[in-house]
Amino acid sequence: MSKKWWLPLLVVGAGVLLFQYLKATKPSSAPIVVEERVWAVDAVRAQPAQGSAQQVLYGQVVSSQRVKVSAPIAAQVASVDKQEGETFSAGERLLQLDALEVALSVQTAQAEFEEAKALLSVEQAAQSVERQREQHEAELLSLAKAEYERNRQLKARSLISDSVLDKSREALLRQQTAWMSAKLVVDQHQAKLNQLQARLAKAQANDERARLNAQRATVIAPYDGRVVRLSVSAGDQVNANTLLMEYDGFDHLEVRAVLPHRYRALVEQALTRTPPLSARLLDEQDASISLPVLRFGGQAVDAGVELVLQVPTALAYLRPGERVRLALDLPLASAAFALPYAALYGQDRLYVIEQGRLAVRQVEQVGEQWRDGERWALVRGELSPQDWVLVTHLPNAISGLPVQVRGAAQGVM
């Protein structure tokens, strides 16, 4: 047994040698390399914008001078020549009140005027007579005063008796009373004369008003327009001041739109220049028709200030209350770039591609332009000509993200 003690050692040594051999001869695996994902995107070159900028505005058509026609007198509606919504030309008849009732109102006013003239004439004649009477009484009073003065002097020299002096004094007092009565009658006639003159003036005004109402009883269009509202029908009996109809003139149509505050200073400067600032209706049919900017409105809201534009006669089919979309032509801001709206992230960010990676840039919107029927944003800020701008909207866009522009060779950017 002492000769076999080495056998276990031999087995252990052989196992170790076999393990080392297997370890040394096992096949080696290639190292795992983690590759960074590159996103395929579209991009455009940043080029300075040319022409003018456009800002889309949303406005409402309104009338600056809506005419409300009321009945001048109580009468029957004889005819309604234009219905609600119909257009009319200057000089056309829109509505007519009963001619006989209008004529009777004119005749009544004229008769009252003639009556007032006659009463005034009679009073003027009576006034003339009373003035003559008052003058005669004044002359007699002067004679009575002279007679009394003579008798008083004669009595002082004892040439007449006291009874003679008393009679002359009594005659003087009676004549003073007669003159005062005549003067009072003249004053009373003058007050009545003033009253009749006022009555005549009132009757004359009523006569002129009746003639004017007779003209207004036939509603004639003063200009081209459209009937907005009709409140009566033929045969209706209306009272004075009853609303008959409302109409708008085509020349009085305006569009009121809200201009964002950031464009206010630019528009204020443009309104003082030539040619005038204008906007276009965003309608394929009427896209070439301009709406001149008239002025700023009197109100402002949180979104901006009200801008008033004139509706040309070519757009007379627009009705008050309609909402329209406009493209306002603005002077182009300096160093502005035109880019698709897909390039914008929020209101003030976009990404440029530098060395195959994204880099964020801060910009400001200064308007927009229409290109091939699409809206492009006009921006200025941290952007240079020939920069490649990302236009594929990536939800995971971040500075440093690796990208590859479709169709561009690796390493171009």
Image (cartoon, rainbow, N blue to C red):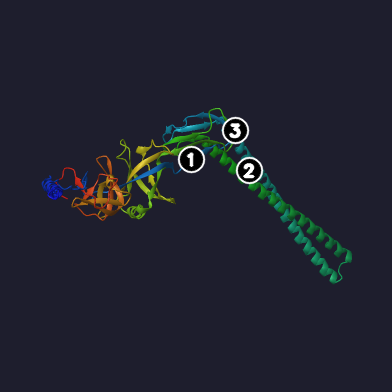
Find out whether the residues at labels 2 and 1 contact each other: C-beta distance under 8 Å. Answer: no
Q: Report crowding for label 1: few under 14, some 14 to 19, many 20 or more residues within 10 A (C-alpha).
A: some
Where residue 388 appears, as percent x and y from the top left, is 20, 50
Question: Tag 3: residue type?
Answer: Leu
Pick the front one: 173 or 18:
18
Name the residue tied to disc 2. 117
The residue that label 1 is drawn on is 67
Is the residue 123 above or below the residue 72 in the image?
Answer: below
Give the farthest residue toward the top: 235
* Comparing labels 3 and 2, the label whose residue is closer to the camera: 3
* Residue drawn at 69 percent across, 51 percent down: 191
Callout 1 amino acid: Val
Choose the circle earlier in sequence order: 2 or 1.
1
Identify the residue at the far bottom of this view: 157
Mark 3 or 2, nearer chain start: 3
Measured from the top left, where is residue 266 in percent x and y?
A: 33, 54
Using residue 341 as the reference point, say whether residue 102 is left or right of it. Answer: right
Q: Residue at x 48, y 40 (%)?
A: 67
Describe residue 223's horizontal placement relative to residue 115 as left or right: left
Number of numbered labels in the structure image = 3
The residue to which callout 3 is attached is 104
User: Callout 3: 10 Å neighbours few (<14), some, many (20+)?
Assistant: few
Q: Closer to the camera: disc 2 or disc 1? A: 1
Residue 88 spot, x, y in % from top left:
42, 33
SS at circle 2: helix
In the depicted view, which residue is nearer to us: 346 or 30?
30
Q: Amino acid at mark 2?
A: Lys
Q: Is residue 150 visible?
A: yes
Query: Disc 1 or disc 3, which is closer to the eye?
Result: 1
Q: CA distance from mark 3 to mark 2?
A: 20 Å
Tell me residue 356's x, y (percent).
19, 50
Q: CA distance from mark 1 to mark 3?
A: 27 Å
